[in-house]
Image: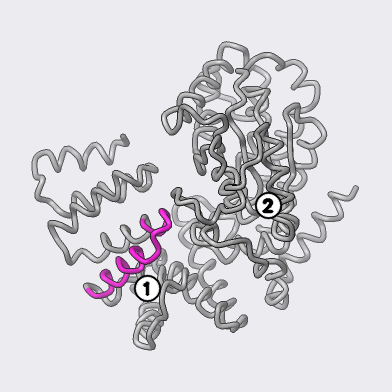
């Protein structure tokens, strides 16, 4: 429990009839990745104060993650009934296309965006929502204008909180990972971790098919899909203190020894055991774990790694039109980030001592059965036909693909960037550099 959640629980112990405290606790629990408890807090807040629009909207988001589209849409309608200017609800309906927006609702979104008092977070959400609304209508120029404004506002927020992306710093960090985690390092680190075969790490760029791959595997009766776990990045941050030094990952890896590696591996296993203790395989589909594959390979030398690959322009464009990270909010930085990601993956392919399977999104879309069978075999499991009915799996999906993975395979996202090519020159130029480097 975080400190904030503890404070709200103490408030509720003294004043259980405080709907705002229930709402704030729910918001904190969402951030703490405790969706079931968050949902209960929002429901209690609404029981005490039915007109709390943001509680309806936040409950709607959680229901969408569980595949309960109609219930989620009803929550957003209820939020707008109580507060017709609820930016959170308007943006969600537009973004996901949950139901046709009325002219009045569209006008209200534009009026909110014209108000200089609008919070930049809400402004970014509304622009992303309107961008996707225009995209579905085929109005690419209008859609991109909204995507550009959404990302400009998002950069403003990142700068304000000191999280602006620095491509030079990031490039240097990738350089250090490559220099540290060479073949000689892995030879020295042999035998430090644990022999468990349960973890399966699905990595790649966001929007590269990681959610789809996990959904296919999680439809197998011997696989539990754990979603995007934070545990590996947490262990990476803890590494210096465990070693008693100030150097951070990857610079401290040369000091890793069996006692610490074993304890870290045990901590990770304990974490996934709390989610599921019986499945033969547990998938962790945190995409940016690609940065930590050096540590993962030491902790779990028998783990499997699946790298999702997608056309660079498609994957970067899809990142740009979703409300993601600091590096996704600028086309030039997107290309630079991809360049370093690609460079690191080339390195991992040459030195990583654990099994690595590359799954190409376009091949998966073209022949889902063949690629799905390859996935299951790679995980050391017998084939199960339920993997082809992945869209019927009712597990919660808490990523930007939460609605897409509820549908059968579709080809509409392949080559989508070409409709926006006139607006993507900074990205295209950066990706051409990335492709030339990868070919050398």
Q: Residues within 10 Å of mark 2 (few under 14, many from 20)?
A: many
Q: Main secondary structure of the magenta part?
A: helix
How far is mark 1 from mark 2, CA to CA? 31 Å
Find numbered disc 1 in the image and state the secondary structure of the residue it sits on: helix
| Residue 313 image offset from top left, x and y in percent | 72, 63
In this image, 415 relative to 57: left or right?
right
Residue carrying label 2: 337
Q: Which mark is residue 257?
A: none
Image coordinates for residue 262, horizontal then vertical, percent: 56, 15
- Asked if 15 appears above or below 101 in the picture, the reply is above
User: Based on the displayed image, in which of its 4 quarters is residue 71 positioned?
Assistant: bottom left
Q: Which residue reaches farthest top? A: 259
Q: Nearer the viewer, residue 177 or 395?
A: 395
* Residue annotated with mark 1: 90
Region in magenta: 63-81
Residue at 77% of width from left, 60% of height from top? Answer: 431
């Amino acid at each position: 429990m975080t400190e904030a959640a503890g404070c709200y629980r103490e408030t509720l112990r003294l004043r259980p009839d405080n709907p705002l405290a229930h709402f704030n606790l729910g918001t904190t629990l969402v951030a703490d990745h405790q969706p079931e408890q968050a949902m209960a807090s929002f429901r209690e807040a609404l029981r005490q104060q039915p007109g709390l629009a943001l509680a309806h909207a936040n409950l709607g988001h959680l229901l969408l993650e569980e595949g309960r589209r109609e219930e989620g849409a009803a929550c957003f309608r209820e939020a707008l009934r109580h507060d017709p200017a609820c930016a959170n609800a308007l943006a969600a309906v537009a973004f996901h296309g949950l139901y046709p927006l009325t002219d009045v609702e569209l006008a209200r979104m534009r009026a909110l965006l014209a108000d200089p008092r609008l919070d930049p977070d809400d402004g970014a959400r509304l622009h992303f929502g309107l961008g996707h609304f225009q995209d579905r209508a085929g109005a690419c120029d209008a859609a991109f204008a909204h995507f550009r404004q959404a990302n400009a506002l998002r950069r403003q927020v990142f700068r304000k909180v000191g999280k602006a992306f620095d491509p030079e710093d990031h490039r240097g960090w990738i350089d250090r990972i490559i220099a540290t985690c060479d073949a000689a390092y892995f030879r020295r680190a042999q035998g430090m971790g644990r022999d468990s075969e349960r973890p399966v790490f699905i990595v790649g760029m966001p929007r590269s098919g990681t959610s789809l791959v996990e959904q296919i595997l999680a439809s197998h009766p011997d696989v539990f899909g754990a979603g995007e776990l934070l545990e590996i990045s947490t262990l990476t941050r803890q590494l210096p203190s465990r070693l008693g030094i100030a150097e951070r990952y990857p610079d401290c890896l040369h000091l890793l020894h069996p006692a610490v590696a074993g304890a870290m591996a045990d901590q990770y296993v304990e974490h996934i055991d709390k989610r599921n203790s019986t499945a033969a395989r547990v998938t962790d589909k945190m995409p940016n774990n690609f940065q930590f594959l050096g540590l993962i390979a030491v902790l779990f030398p028998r783990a499997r790694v699946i790298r999702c690959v997608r056309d660079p322009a498609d994957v970067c464009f899809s990142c740009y039109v979703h409300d993601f990270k600091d590096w996704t909010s600028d086309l030039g930085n997107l290309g630079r980030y991809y360049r370093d990601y690609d460079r690191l993956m080339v390195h991992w392919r040459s030195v990583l001592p654990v099994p690595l399977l590359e799954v190409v999104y376009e091949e998966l879309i073209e022949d889902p059965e063949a690629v799905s069978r390859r996935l299951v075999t790679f995980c050391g499991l017998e084939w199960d036909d339920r993997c082809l009915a992945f869209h019927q799996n009712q597990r919660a999906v808490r990523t930007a693909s939460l609605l897409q993975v509820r549908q059968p395979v579709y080809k509409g996202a392949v080559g989508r960037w070409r409709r926006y090519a006139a607006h993507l020159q900074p990205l295209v130029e950066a990706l051409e550099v990335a492709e030339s480097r990868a070919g050398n």
